[in-house]
Image (cartoon, coloured by chain):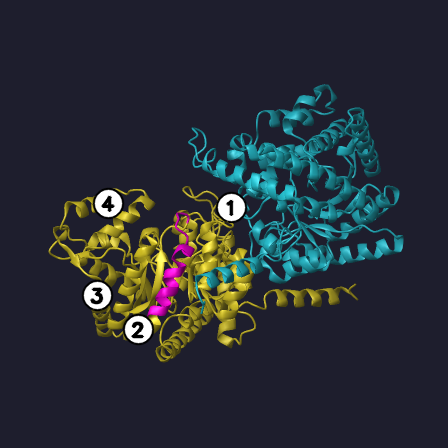
Chain colours: A yellow, B cyan
Amino acid sequence: MYRNFEHYKNERAALIQRDRSLRTDHSEVLSEEEIKADRVLREIRAVEAATIWNEKYSDIEHPFPGMEFLTGRSIVVQTKLFKILSKARVLLATPFNTWVQLHTARDTFNASLAPTRRIAHIILLIRSGTNLLASLPFLEDWSTFVPVWRKYIYEFLRSSAEDGISYLEARVMFSMEYMIGEDGAQNVPHREWLLIFDEVQNALKADLRAQGKEDEFIGARIIYTALRFIPTEELDWFCEDCISLKKEFPHLIAGFDLAGPENIPPPLINYAEGLLRFRERQREEEVDIPLLLHAGETCGDGTHADMNLYDAILLGSKRIGHGFSLVKHPSLMQECREKGVLVEVCPISNEVLRLTSNMPMHPLPILLNNGVPVSISSDDPGVFGNPGLSFDMYQVLASSEITGLITLRELARDSLKYSTLDPETKERALDHWNRRWESFVKWVADSSS
Amino acid sequence: MYRNFEHYKNERAALIQRDRSLRTDHSEVLSEEEIKADRVLREIRAVEAATIWNEKYSDIEHPFPGMEFLTGRSIVVQTKLFKILSKARVLLATPFNTWVQLHTARDTFNASLAPTRRIAHIILLIRSGTNLLASLPFLEDWSTFVPVWRKYIYEFLRSSAEDGISYLEARVMFSMEYMIGEDGAQNVPHREWLLIFDEVQNALKADLRAQGKEDEFIGARIIYTALRFIPTEELDWFCEDCISLKKEFPHLIAGFDLAGPENIPPPLINYAEGLLRFRERQREEEVDIPLLLHAGETCGDGTHADMNLYDAILLGSKRIGHGFSLVKHPSLMQECREKGVLVEVCPISNEVLRLTSNMPMHPLPILLNNGVPVSISSDDPGVFGNPGLSFDMYQVLASSEITGLITLRELARDSLKYSTLDPETKERALDHWNRRWESFVKWVADSSS
C-alpha cells in the first residue's frame, strides 16, 4: 500500500494540502517578513497557551485559550498576543450595531439632556447592572435620543478607528420613524439621521486630521436595517424609504437588511416576494442597494432560522450576517464560494449568546476550510465589552493551530474586498490597507529580534 | 432573475434537494407505512417540544430537546418519543466499552468475591459517588476481576439485547496482560478472556432461547484495543498478540484499535510505521484484522488529536471511533464518503465529556449532509446512564427538524452494513433486521390510528 514510511509521509503531506486547498490563506505568496511575523505569533501563542492560560486563577476555573469571553477577558488583556493584535490598527469591520462602550456612554452622558423620565430611568437601570439581554431594548430606546445618538456615533467611529478599523459598514435600525430631538419631541425623521451621521463622521475626520491621523479612517456607511417582525405588507414602506434615502445620500447607504432574533417567526421566506419587488423597484429608480441579510444565526437543523439561509442565498444577498448554521449546508457553502458571498462571523457574540460555548467549539474553521469568504465582525460590542475587533480576532487566533498571521491578513482583506465601496474607492482603500499591513508585519517580525 | 414567486419557490425546493442530496436518508424508496410512521414521530416530537420540553421544572432550568443529557434525562424518560425508541428493539450498536449500568453491577456484586482490599475500596468509592471522570480508571481496575468481568459482559450483552441491539462489536482494552482470577492472583491471560467472552455470550443466547427470544440477539465480537500511550516499540507486541488471538478465535476478533484521551500525546502518527508493519504481518499470517481507530475526538483545529484523522484515513481504518472533528475536513469527509469509512458517533459521550454543550450544537448534521456513513454508538453507557442506544438515538432525533424515521433506519442499517461480519452472516443479519424494522414501523404507524 505504501512503499515505505517516507512514501506514507509524502502521501500524508499531500492529503493535508488537498484538505486545506480551499482556504484563502493557502498557497499564497508570502513575504520574508510575513513568514517571520507568522512564526513570531505562533511562538507567542504556544508559549502563552502553556503559561498564562495554564495558571491557576482564584476567579477563573479551568482557563483555556478561546474560553468564554466574559470570563476569560481579564486574562486575554494580559496576553502579548492580544497586545500585538490590538496595536495592529490594520483591521476592518462591518459591525452589526451602533453601540459604544457602556462606560463611555455613561461617562459622557449629561443627565440634564434627558428629555423624559423614561430615559433617565433607563440610565439608572444600566447603572444598576440589569440583565444583559433585557437591557438591549432599553439601550435601543436610549440611543434614539438625538444628542445621545450623536455622541454614540462619534464614539463608536472613534473607538473603531483607534482599534485599527479604517472603514466600516454599520447596521442602523430604522424601525422607528422618528428619533427624539433635542427639544424632547419625537420628530426627527430618517433623512436627518443620515445628515447627523455624515456630520459626525466629518467631525471625526477633522479631529483625526488635526492629530495627523487622517490616514487611519476612510469612513463609514450605513446598512439600512428594518426589524424582521414587521407585517409583510409593511416591508414595501421600508424599501421605498430606503430607496429615497439612497437617492439623496448615495455615499451613505451601503445596503439593506432585516434583523431580529431568528428563532422567533416570521421566517425570511415571508418577505421574499417583497424583497424581489424591492429589486424591481431599484431597477425602475436606477439605484443599487445590495441585500446584506442576517440568516442562520442558530444551532437549529432545518428550523426556520436555519432555512433562512436558503432564502438569503436565493435572494442574492451579497453578504450573510452571522450565517452560523451555514456549515451544515454543503451546497450553500459551495454557492458562497463560487458566487463570492461573504459571511460576517461574530465570534464573541455567538459565544455570549450561547450559539457556541467557547471558540474551540465554534464552526469558523469549517467555513475557512471550505473556502467560504469570511470577515470577522462585532455585534453589540459595547454591551459585550469587545470594542473594535481585536478581541474577536484574538479569540479566532488563540483557538486554532492552523490559523495564523496569513489567515488574519485574508480575513481583514476580504472584509474590504467584499465591502460595498465602489471599485475605485475600494482600490484606494486596499492600497492604503496594504501599506498599513506591511508596517504591522515589519513591526511584529522585528519584535522578535 | 425569477419570473415570478412560483419560480422562486421552485428554485428554492431544488436548492434544498441539492443541498441534501448526499444524505443517506435522501430519495430512498419509502413504504406507505414508513411515510405514516415518520409523520407520527415528527408530530410527537413537535408536540413534545411545545409541551413537556416547554414546562417549568423546579430542578431543571431552561429545558429543551437535546439538552445536557445528565440534566435532562428525567424529562427524556417521560417522553412518548423515547418510549417509542426504547421499544424499537431494532437498532444496533458498536459500543466503545464494556461497561454495564453501575447500579446493576453494584446490585449483583458479591463483596465476598473481592480478592483484594483495593477492589472493595473501589466499590466504596463508586457507592459514595466519586467524580465521574476520576472514577473511570477505578472502574477499569474493578472490571478486570474475572468473576466481575463475567457478570459485566453478561449484563452488558443482555441489556443491549433488551434495548433492541441485535449485534455488537465491543472495544475491550487489552492493555494489561493478565486479569485477576477467582483465586485473587493476576494470572488470567488474554486467550482466556476470549474464552470467557464466548462462554458468556453462549449462556445469554441459551437464556434467550429458553424465553423464546433467540431471534433478538445474533452475537457480539471484540475490537482488540491497546492503550494509545504505550511506547512505540511496544506496539508490535500487541499486534502479534492480536494476530495470534485472531488465528485462535477468528469469529471473536472484529478489529484492532488504539484508544486513550487524544489530547494527551503521543499522536497516532507515532504508531503509523508499526501499524503498517501490522498489515504486513497479517498478510504473512493470512489473517485480516481491520483497523477501527479512534481519531479526532476533539474540538481542536490542527491539534494532534485533530491531525490523527489524517492518519486514521491513510492507514485504511474501516471505521473511525468518534471522528468528532472530521467535519472540519472537506477532503477527509469526501474520502469517507467515497471509500465507505463509517464514523461511530457517540452523542451523549461527546456532550458529557464537553466536546459539545448540547445536541443542537453537535456536528452530526454536517456528517449526514455530507454523506459520511454514520452509526450511533454508545461510550461508557454504564457510567453516563445511557444503556443500550435508545438514549443516544433520542438525543439525535429530538434535536433536528430534518432527521426522522428514515434517518434512524439508515443509521441503524449502516451500523450493520459497516460491521466486520463476513458477507454471508451480514446478509442474514440484514434480513433479520429488515423484518424487525417492518414490524416496528407498522407498530408506530398503527399507534396513530
Image position, residue B143 (x, y; %): 71, 32
Q: Of the residues tagged 2 and 3, which is closer to the observer? A: 2
Frontmost residue, A218 versus A325? A325
**Chain under disc 4:** A
Residue B107, relative to residue B218: is it above or below?
Answer: above
* Discs 4 and 1 carry the same chain letter: no
**Chain under disc 1:** B
Report the residue marked by disc 2.
A285
Disc 4, SS: helix
Residue visible at 48% across and 44% down in the picture: A62
In-image side of B104 versus A310 (left or right)? right
Report the residue marked by disc 1.
B360
In-image side of A2 versus B3 (left or right)? right
Image position, residue A118 (x, y; %): 18, 45
The quarter of the picture where residue B138 lies is top right
- Mark 3 touches mark 4? (CB < 8 Å): no
- Amino acid under label 1? Pro
The segment highlighted magenta reads A263-281
Asked whether A95 falls inside the magenta stretch, the response is no
Report the residue marked by disc 4.
A127
Gap in angstroms between the C-alphas marked 2 and 3: 18 Å
Residue neighbourhood size for the residue with mark 3, other residues' Cα within 10 Å, grouped as few (<14), some (14–19), many (≥20): some
Asked whether A280 falls inside the magenta stretch, the response is yes
* Discs 3 and 4 carry the same chain letter: yes
Q: Earlier in the sequence, mark 2 or mark 3?
A: 3
Gap in angstroms between the C-alphas marked 1 and 2: 44 Å
Gap in angstroms between the C-alphas marked 4 and 2: 47 Å
The quarter of the picture where residue B169 lies is top right
